[in-house]
Image (cartoon, helix red, strand yellow):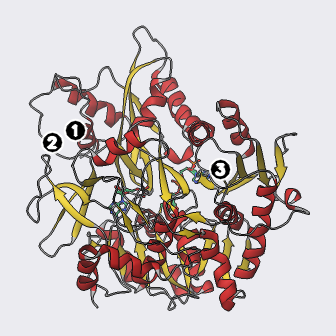
Amino acid sequence: MGYKEVYDRSLADPEGFWMEAAEAIDWVRKPSRALFAGNAPLYEWFKDGQVNTCWNAVDRHVVAGHGDRIAIIHDSPVTGSQQKITYAELQTRVASLAGALRARGVAKGDRVIIYMPMVPEALEAMLACARLGAVHSVVFGGFAAHELAVRIDDCTPKCIIAGSCGIEPGRVVQYKPLLDGAIEQAAHKPEFCVIFQREQEVAKLTGGRDLDWHDFQRGVDPADCVPVSGDHPAYILYTSGTTGAPKGVVRATAGHLVALNWSMKNIYNVNPGEVFWAASDVGWVVGHSYICYGPLIHGNTTVVFEGKPVGTPDAGTFWRVISEHGVRSFFTAPTAFRAIKRDDPKGELIKNHDISCLRALYLAGERADPDTIEWAQNVMGVPVYDHWWQTETGWTIAGNPAGIEALPVKIGSPTVAMPGYDVRILDEGGHEVAPGTLGAIAVRLPLPPGTLPGLWQAEERFRKSYLNTFSGYYETGDAGMKDEDGYLWIMARTDDVINVAGHRLSTGAMEEVLAGHPDVAECAVIGVSDALKGQAPVGFLCLTRGVDRPHDEITRECVARVRDQIGPVAAFKLAVVVDRLPKTRSGKILRAIMVRIADGQDYKMPATIDDPAILDEIRTALQSIGLARN
Ligand code: COA
Ligand code: AMP
């Protein structure tokens, strides 16, 4: 069957389609059906099945005789080390860690926060939670204490598992002070913390609270897999929304297993036993789905890469990893390729490596610009598949189904809707628009298995954020169009979310931090175009009347404040003081026009603008920080 037949069947007979895909999963008790629609527009998949994620990702491969197969390759140019872990070893390690957590009282349904760098132990911690039916929430290491505290208060973890440090080029990031600071700030206190000590930074443990990763496993019985129901939350992953409060995206266990397993062959075109590499971080959804769960559930070898595309040690690192470990399919964000292209424009470094093992490159996380795609195609000599998805969906909404049928690539489009996703382009009134017309991208409900059933303990927010705008649809938050061939084109976000180096960030969250500065009366943050990172945040500050300090002192403090409270990952480096912000007569800040001015693009003067002269002031302010130059 080709793509069209498979896709059409998935929409005409979702029950049959997904029950068939569910055959590839080991169930403790098979579900009686796929879709449970009794609570529409909230849907659940495989709800009455009993299953365990860790069993499917680890134990079943050992039982099937693949215990000697490599499950995880840790390749860490930043520490100069490599490690390979077989499925049998992974089973022993995860069962031991789960046993130690169980001995300390962690049980089904308890939340566990994981704050770790790119080491195999991060995956082991995720899998140990899954083994017990505990619900993990991984927090990206580039977030600062305040962001960690917000997540602690939202999901109220019984314990936190943390690394002692992460390693960024040129510096060791100590995690313990961030962890301590977060626990101090949070109203909820975890019962205990488990610290994985690394030789680059041995953290001082807090007596009565912190346990050493190895010590606390000593003499404890390993734990078996605990069956959970299909709708049990496998994890919570926080992602940026329009406000400072991140959204706790919930992933239900059974749909996650079925969809990720299905995607490994049909989208990423790998067979069990082959090496799959997603160069991202376990703190993001790409890391959850395609560094940890997808490849392991499917019986692949996954690469855990602790390094950067450039500078660790050079722009040839990716080629080395691909050739050294025999990577068949490779997934990363376009920004990584822009970084490589900038350092090695002619792709000279690839000549030192044989990457003939590679079948395709997959890009996602942000818009893939045509230049980058073409450069990657030319240098690597493999097809480049852009694909579009979100933390909320957990796997591809639109992509090129290479394992079913590789469709012709149209550069700039992530290709077509994946099975289960009935993608429509709607106008403001919720009516479908003609092909080639821009609109809001929505997906007709129900979403397929593996997507979010809701937000953690926030049903109203879930409905408001995703379901209420277009009745019967999931609102993606992206705008774009569909062409005559059914190819999708993703153009922009419809909300205040920006995308910096493939990282999804909320300008609203940054504004909340800036507004907290005592001298700032009002502010706005916009995302301007950045040649490397796609977008970069810029802050506009209106000062409180009577403040008479040098502006550069205040902007410096504001930059430091965002780094301190959100984290270095926000890459907030530019702020400028202005007298006033451009607004409509009803008081809405005209952010979209400010972006166009910053990017040197034309714009139409909005009829509702309060005072057009402000736009000239904004242009002058932007020019003072090197932007808005035509
Ligand atoms: N822990 C602590 N700090 C971190 C961190 C982590 N896990 N990850 C990033 N940071 C810090 C960086 O050190 C940097 O700090 P600095 O301001 O002191 O330089 C800051 O956060 C911004 O990081 P980043 O966005 O990674 O920018 P960069 O300039 O260091 O590197 C790229 C640019 C393009 C090389 C980098 O973004 C990259 O490798 N991107 C790959 C894409 C990716 O993984 N996307 C995830 C979604 S698929
Ligand atoms: P995240 O939840 O962090 O994965 O971010 C999801 C958002 O990133 C999407 O809603 C899009 O705005 C953007 N995005 C992801 N992949 C793509 C893509 N292939 N093309 C364009 N935008 C993308």
Which residue appears farthest toward the right when viewing the image?
219
Check disc 1 and report the residue beneath it: 593
Task: Looking at the picture, tell me which residue is in the foreground, 192 or 222.
Answer: 222
Check disc 3 and report the residue beneath it: 110
Check disc 2 and report the residue beneath it: 603
Q: Classify mark 1: residues with Cα within 10 Å, few (<14), some (14-19) or many (20+).
A: some
The alpha-carbon separation of the residues under discs 1 and 3 comes to 46 Å
Left or right of 121? Residue 321 is: left
The residue drawn where x is 47% and y is 65% is: 336
Depth check, mark 2 against mark 3: the one in front is 3
Q: Earlier in the sequence, mark 1 or mark 3?
A: 3
On whether ligand 2 comes within 8 Å of the CB at mark 2, the answer is: no
SS at badge 2: loop
Looking at the rendered structure, the kind of residue marked 3 is Asp
SS at badge 1: helix
The alpha-carbon separation of the residues under discs 1 and 2 comes to 7 Å
User: Ligand 1, what quadrant?
Assistant: bottom right
Left or right of 379? Residue 28 is: right
